[in-house]
Image (tube, coloured by chain):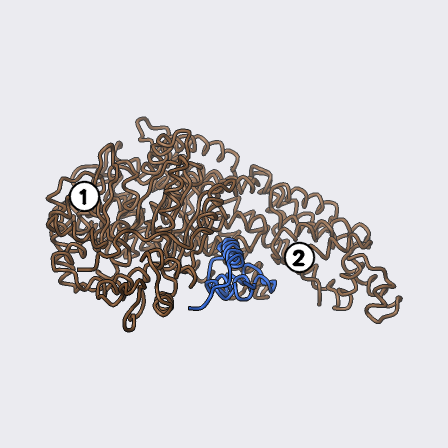
């Protein structure tokens, strides 16, 4: 049995500065809270406890939980004590209700939600914290282990600077010695102080364990009024080994209770009491191995027990053999089952424990838990639970859940095999089987034709009232197959039918809007989609399955030339998906944020968003439109940054992901055009862009055809100018007419026309295109023998290019290359732009005044400027102008 | 206590952060050297400076 000689909590020593900083961080304007990070045992939890005690004294309302590995296996598990009964709700509902309830509890006061070991939080819990913080409902006070990966929403808060970060350091030697003196309430001899300080390395937990070991063995004792360690204070390794050493004397019943907690902490006290005698639990508490607390859940108080420190759980789990672990899990399962289940997530927890122990799982619990895991994107756990539900006789719904989990795990063949063995009963199940099968065939196996056949066959057999979801999916697949008319008529007919469920209505509006936007009617699309956006606003739980509506709106805004609005929409939807933890959809919208950035010319920003988005999508999908789109845009972004190797790999990934060739191949062709340009293959680049335009023409995607023809012109071939003018006449919105006018002005070398187009493109938010048009205007003036007229567009181009994060496109590269400065010209130009006179420059560079002025005139001429002030603007905004 | 002695009494990360800052090293480089997120650096420097000030205000520690 470990010693109990120094059982009372140790005083907090050496953390005065940290507490003061914590208080300042929480009071900082717009602060979302603080994360205390640090190594295990450094004192994060102790510091958090003290900070919370002070906040409580100052009148803050405190809600605190501790995340554990066991609790994090269930979405929202760690935050369960703060949440409404969760199992019957979608993740989005849990978020909404929780925020509302906590806001109600807070009233006009100040609320802090505190989580110990936040690095162990599941995605759903961290999304909730993000929402609490970003809506200013609560301040966060979190601890996290250094070096562990934090969930994305919390990283986001950190990167935005919204949450303060305190990297807690070990105590200094002076602080360790002060702590020892206070903890032992006496004087320590210098050698003992030195040795304990050296061995503990300032780690408070390790120090505590060393002292406990010394007290327990009698090596550390007060002799003649001085605390002294007789012999060498030895503890091999670090805190973990010290804890193992301290736990060694536990009796068998004590160890078993502690091990059960290590597998499933926190446990309700009544559950633990079914595993261990009350006396054993009291002994463990007295020895400081476990701690008990009460939580209020839905107006009831519940006693719960956890280990004193997460490292205790690690030490105990590390010592378990597989059979011992299985046996303990079995006993835990029995204890949980025998205790009245009170929390909504208890059945899921029980199912998980039963599953891990290899025991039979209650079918309904397993199915409910599997669906919950599916909604949170935890496909591997969902698959295990769904399989257990199937084995327990849950039947068709469990088979569908299993198949969906398999699709999510990128094992589409197995998903299909499960569905082929399923036996649906009734029209609703037949429809669900067809839908699940079609989606797996399409997204998982890339068999778009077979997916459509499955839908058609089911639609032939099903009554109208069971068919609406299938019609929406079929319309979407038809659209991807390049049959815009079929997609539009299917969705329009559904919208005109009576009694169509809301979800299907929203889906049909989304497909119809997308079809309108792509066929050159983006303004009608925006109007149509807005009605769906209103419906979706009232039913946010449909966000995960009805995102086509928002994708359509994004596309329509872009094709109408309203790029800033599209960028705002992408950012807003992205944030909602982060909060709702909806994967892999979050990946696609992460990419759309990047695409919007690329349209405005910010290729560096675009690239980082696209890399993240594509990697999330790859985690869940083998191929299909989302992957093709994002990898393609990534290839373009990398090409504009001159990163040919990354552009090539992204293009290859886009190629490999094609599922619906009629619409996806033209997109890949267009992206290939930009990669070829970056490789210096200009002729082939133009061919690829024109091939893309032809493909889209065949599919009836007029807006995209125009985009392809315009890109071909940017790459140097104006052959599509007349077709573009035809398209401009039949496409709505400002974008396509502006693209046509751009190419016409290029073809006519029309300087004033290009200047006008540059302004128009800038107004739309297409900054890189605007910079290109300004550059081309300057070039047209120069070629026409009007160098003075070239200055204004040249300056405009420089200013616009400066907003484009050094993106390189053909016309900007063409304009920059022959006009580049020599090193000497650049040196003179830079010094002159700083205000130095020619005489000063001559003296400093050891040149004649005449030579300096010659260099300066050359620089003026090449950069198209006529004064030192203009020179300063150009040099500040155009980075690459030296040969 | 003189500054160098006080620095040597600090936890190594604090001492190193302050020395790097005094050499004009930026936050990103300090973060890289100490293997921390760059967002952690301002607070780390603030704490290090506060701890140093505490040490400087202390009387010399006598050896046992």
Q: In which quarter of the image is the C terminus of chain B?
A: bottom left
Q: Which of marks 2 and 1 is nearer the N terminus?
A: 1
Q: Nearer the viewer, residue A211 or A679?
A: A211
Against A380, residue A136 (above or below) is above
| Chain letter of the residue carrying label 1 | A
Q: Which chain wears brown? A: A
| Chain letter of the residue carrying label 2 | A
Query: Residue A852 at what x, y percent from top left?
Result: 84, 66
Against B11, residue A69 (above or below) is above
> Dot 2, how many residues are within 10 Å of its Cα: few (below 14), some (14-19), or many (20+)?
many
Q: Which of B64 and A757 is in front in this view?
A: B64
Query: Residue A108 at what x, y percent from top left?
Result: 42, 29
Q: Name the residue under label 2.
A: A812
Q: Chain B is drawn in which colour?
A: blue
Query: In the image, is A658 to the left or to the right of A387?
Result: right
* Helix, strand or loop for disc 2: helix
Q: Name the residue under label 1.
A: A347
In the image, which is nearer the foreground, mark 2 or mark 1?
1
Query: Residue A539 at what x, y percent from top left?
Result: 36, 32
Query: In the image, is B36 to the left or to the right of A739?
Result: left
Against B40, residue A497 (above or below) is above
> Dot 1, how many residues are within 10 Å of its Cα: few (below 14), some (14-19), or many (20+)?
many
């Amino acid at each position: 049995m470990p010693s109990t000689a120094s059982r009372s909590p140790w005083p907090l020593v050496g953390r005065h500065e940290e507490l003061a900083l914590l208080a300042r961080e929480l009071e900082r304007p717009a602060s979302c809270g603080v994360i205390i990070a640090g190594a295990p045992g450094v004192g994060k939890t102790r510091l958090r406890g003290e900070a919370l005690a002070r906040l409580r004294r100052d009148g803050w309302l405190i809600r605190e939980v501790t995340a554990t590995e066991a609790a994090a296996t269930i979405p929202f598990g760690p935050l369960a004590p703060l949440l409404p009964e969760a199992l019957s709700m979608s993740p989005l509902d849990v978020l909404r209700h929780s925020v509302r309830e906590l806001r109600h509890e807070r009233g006009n006061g100040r609320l802090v939600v505190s989580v110990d070991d936040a690095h162990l939080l599941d995605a759903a819990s961290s999304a909730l914290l993000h929402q609490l913080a970003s809506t200013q409902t609560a301040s966060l006070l979190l601890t996290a282990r250094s070096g562990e990966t934090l969930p994305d929403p919390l990283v986001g808060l950190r990167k935005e600077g919204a949450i303060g970060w305190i990297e807690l350091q070990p105590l200094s030697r002076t602080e360790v010695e002060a702590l020892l003196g206070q903890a032992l309430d006496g004087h320590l001899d210098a050698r003992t102080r030195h040795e304990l300080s050296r061995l503990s390395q300032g780690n408070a937990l390790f120090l505590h364990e060393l002292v406990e070991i010394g007290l327990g063995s009698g090596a550390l004792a007060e002799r003649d009024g001085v605390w002294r360690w007789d012999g060498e204070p030895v503890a091999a390794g670090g805190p973990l080994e010290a804890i193992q050493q301290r736990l060694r004397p536990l009796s068998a019943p004590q160890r078993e209770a502690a091990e059960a907690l290590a597998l499933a902490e926190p446990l309700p006290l009544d559950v633990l009491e079914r595993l261990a005698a009350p006396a054993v639990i009291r002994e463990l508490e007295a020895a400081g191995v476990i701690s008990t607390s009460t939580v209020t859940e839905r107006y009831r108080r519940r006693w719960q027990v956890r280990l004193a420190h997460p490292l205790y759980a690690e030490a105990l789990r590390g010592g378990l053999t597989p059979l011992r672990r299985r046996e303990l899990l079995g006993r835990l399962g029995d204890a949980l089952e025998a205790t009245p289940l009170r929390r909504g997530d208890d059945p899921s927890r029980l199912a998980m424990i039963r599953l891990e122990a290899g025991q039979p799982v209650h079918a309904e619990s397993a199915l409910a838990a599997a669906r919950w895991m599916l909604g949170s994107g935890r496909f591997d756990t969902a698959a295990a639970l769904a399989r257990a539900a199937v084995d327990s006789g849950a039947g068709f719904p469990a088979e569908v859940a299993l198949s969906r989990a398999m699709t999510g795990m990128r094992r589409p063949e197995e998903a299909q095999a499960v569905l082929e063995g399923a036996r649906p009963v009734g029209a609703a199940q037949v429809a669900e089987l067809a839908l699940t099968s079609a989606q797996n065939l399409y997204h998982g196996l890339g068999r778009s034709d077979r997916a459509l056949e499955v839908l058609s066959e089911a639609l032939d057999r099903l009554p109208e009232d069971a068919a609406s979801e299938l019609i929406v999916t079929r319309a979407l697949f038809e659209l991807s197959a390049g049959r815009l008319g079929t997609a539009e008529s299917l969705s329009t007919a559904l919208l005109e039918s009576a009694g169509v469920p809301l979800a299907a209505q929203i889906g049909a509006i989304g497909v119809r809007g997308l079809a309108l936007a792509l066929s050159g009617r983006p303004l009608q699309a925006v109007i149509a989609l807005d009605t769906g956006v209103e419906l979706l606003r009232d039913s946010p739980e449909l966000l995960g399955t009805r995102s086509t509506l928002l994708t359509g709106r994004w596309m329509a805004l872009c094709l109408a030339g309203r790029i800033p609005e599209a960028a705002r929409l992408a950012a807003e939807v992205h944030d909602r998906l982060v909060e709702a933890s909806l994967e892999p959809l979050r990946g696609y919208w992460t990419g759309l944020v990047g695409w919007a950035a690329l349209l405005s010319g910010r290729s560096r920003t675009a690239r980082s968003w696209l890399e993240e988005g594509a990697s999330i999508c790859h985690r869940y999908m083998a191929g299909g439109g989302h992957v093709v789109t994002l990898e393609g845009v990534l290839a373009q972004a990398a090409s504009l940054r001159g990163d040919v190797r990354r552009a090539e790999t992204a293009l290859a990934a886009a190629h490999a992901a094609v599922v619906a060739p009629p619409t996806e191949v033209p997109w890949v062709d267009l992206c290939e055009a930009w990669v070829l340009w970056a490789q210096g293959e200009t002729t082939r680049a133009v061919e690829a862009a024109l091939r893309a335009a032809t493909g889209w023409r065949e599919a009836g995607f007029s807006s995209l055809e125009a985009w392809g023809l315009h890109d071909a012109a940017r790459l140097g071939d104006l052959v599509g100018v007349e077709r573009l003018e035809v398209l401009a006449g039949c496409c709505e919105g400002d974008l396509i007419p502006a693209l046509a006018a751009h190419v016409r002005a290029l073809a006519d070398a029309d300087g004033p026309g290009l200047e006008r187009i540059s302004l128009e493109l800038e107004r739309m938010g297409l900054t890189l295109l605007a910079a290109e048009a300004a550059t081309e205007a300057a070039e047209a003036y120069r070629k026409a023998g009007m160098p003075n007229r070239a200055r204004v567009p040249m300056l405009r181009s420089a200013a616009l290019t400066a907003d484009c994060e050094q993106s390189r496109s053909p016309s900007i590269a063409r304009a920059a290359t022959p006009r580049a400065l020599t090193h000497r010209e650049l040196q003179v130009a830079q010094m002159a732009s700083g205000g130095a006179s020619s005489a000063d420059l001559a003296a400093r560079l050891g040149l004649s005044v005449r030579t300096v002025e010659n260099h300066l005139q050359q620089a003026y001429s090449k950069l198209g400027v006529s004064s030192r002030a203009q020179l300063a603007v150009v040099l500040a905004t155009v980075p690459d102008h030296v040969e | 206590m003189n500054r160098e002695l006080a620095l040597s009494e600090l936890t190594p990360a604090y001492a190193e952060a302050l020395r790097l800052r005094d050499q004009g090293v930026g936050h990103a480089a300090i973060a890289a050297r100490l293997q921390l997120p760059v967002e952690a650096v301002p607070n780390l420097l603030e704490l290090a400076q506060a701890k140093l000030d505490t040490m400087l205000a202390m009387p010399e520690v006598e050896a046992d």
